Amino acid sequence: MINKNIVDRKTIAELLNLYPFIEDFLTDHLIDLDDAKDTTLIAHLNLLDPEILEEKAIIPDELIDSFIVYTNQMIDFLGIKEDKRVQSITLKPGFNKYKEAETFEELTINKGEIIAIVGPTGSGKSRLLADIEWGANADTPTNRTILIDGKTMNIESRFSSNNKLVAQLSQNMNFVMDLSVEEFIELHAKSRMVENEREVIEKIFNKANELAGEKFALDTPITSLSGGQSRALMIADVAILSKSPIVLIDEIENAGIDRKKALDLLVGEEKIVLMATHDPILALMGDKRIIISNGGIDKVMEITVEEKAILHKLESLDDVIQGMRTKLRYGQELEANFEIIKN
Ligand SMILES: Nc1ncnc2c1ncn2[C@@H]1O[C@H](COP(=O)(O)OP(=O)(O)OP(=O)(O)O)[C@@H](O)[C@H]1O
């Protein structure tokens, strides 16, 4: 089944590749496929002249909604083998540290969504991630319940180490195995029984190097990767090779990797991503954010249009800071005059 997150993130060409039958719907609605293939449907509609939209009686949001309904009906009708992956997780309220009931409405997170978890140090962000990893069923200190596709996690999924529903990326990841990067990925690819092993190894290696600040080689021993490089390798590995549909990230801000690319990579693979963070850029990169206070979920907020604009400015500031970091690292002097490019 598709949902709005998927339609918002995939290009029309990618959607056509998955569901060739949508061509009829798009052409019936006068979408010029030659023009539109490399953009998302919403981006394409937003680029159209308002007069043309009016003339064709197209209201972008309504068209997207009917596109989703049509595509899902066709998936049903054609009996297309349904994606067995998890479609959503739901958090049901429990108690905060003072045993007061959490007041948020039950929260459902769909695949392709990014949720930031924010709150002061010690407020319970990691605890929430642990509840999700554990598949809490009113049996953790918070008394929360986590539903996967509307159901509590069964015992097998909770305790099995194969087919884990949840992949966890934490701040401190140390490798202890005596393997090269290539051998490490190969081992993982073999255990997953992938057919196109070479291709997968190359893809993970290239993606990891795109995310990492300092490049590494296929024959670099994994024990000599830096913190940021190991984190980049794990993210690429989880995104491309791991079948776990849910990814939990505990603070990637200090890992020295390209955070935006990392999130885009995970979400592009249609994972459900939850990340605990103190970093305003990451917090605003989420579609929603969960505010934690005293061990409880205080509220759930959606990113506003104004915040999206602020995120854009913060990213420019961040570029300046990263640039300065690079200069300092390579022994250069900083200049007082610097420009913040985007506005
Ligand atoms: N609802 C709760 N009931 C009981 N204990 C809780 C609850 N929420 C959190 N805790 C406990 O509070 C402590 C601090 O929580 P946690 O480590 O999750 O904070 P954090 O927000 O991740 O902190 P930091 O930002 O420093 O990483 C932990 O021992 C955790 O188990």
Image (spheres, rainbow, N blue to C red):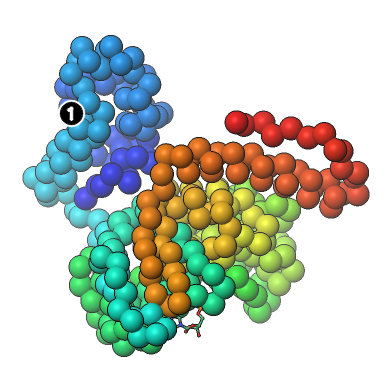
Q: Which residue is mark 1?
A: 25
Image quarter (top left, top right, bottom left or bottom right) of the C terminus: top right
The three-letter amino acid code for the residue at tag 1 is Phe
Q: Is residue 34 left or right of 293 when viewed as pictured?
A: left
Q: Position of residue 20 (x, y in %)?
A: 24, 35
The relative height of residue 151 versus residue 77 in the rendered view (above or below) is: below
- Which residue corresponds to the image point at 72% horizontal and 41% vertical from the top-left? 320
The residue closer to the viewer here, 125 or 29, is 125
Q: Position of residue 138 (x, y in %)?
A: 28, 84
- Which residue corresponds to the image point at 35% horizontal and 25% vertical from the top-left? 46
Is ligand 1 less than 8 Å from the beta carbon at label 1? Answer: no
Q: Kindly indicate the quadrant of the structure image that contains residue 7.
A: top left
Q: Position of residue 181 (x, y in %)?
A: 64, 64
Q: Position of residue 139 (x, y in %)?
A: 31, 88
Q: Is residue 295 left or right of 334 when viewed as pictured?
A: left
The residue closer to the viewer here, 42 or 123, is 123
The reply to whether residue 201 is visible in this rendering is no
Q: Is residue 318 left or right of 32 when viewed as pictured?
A: right
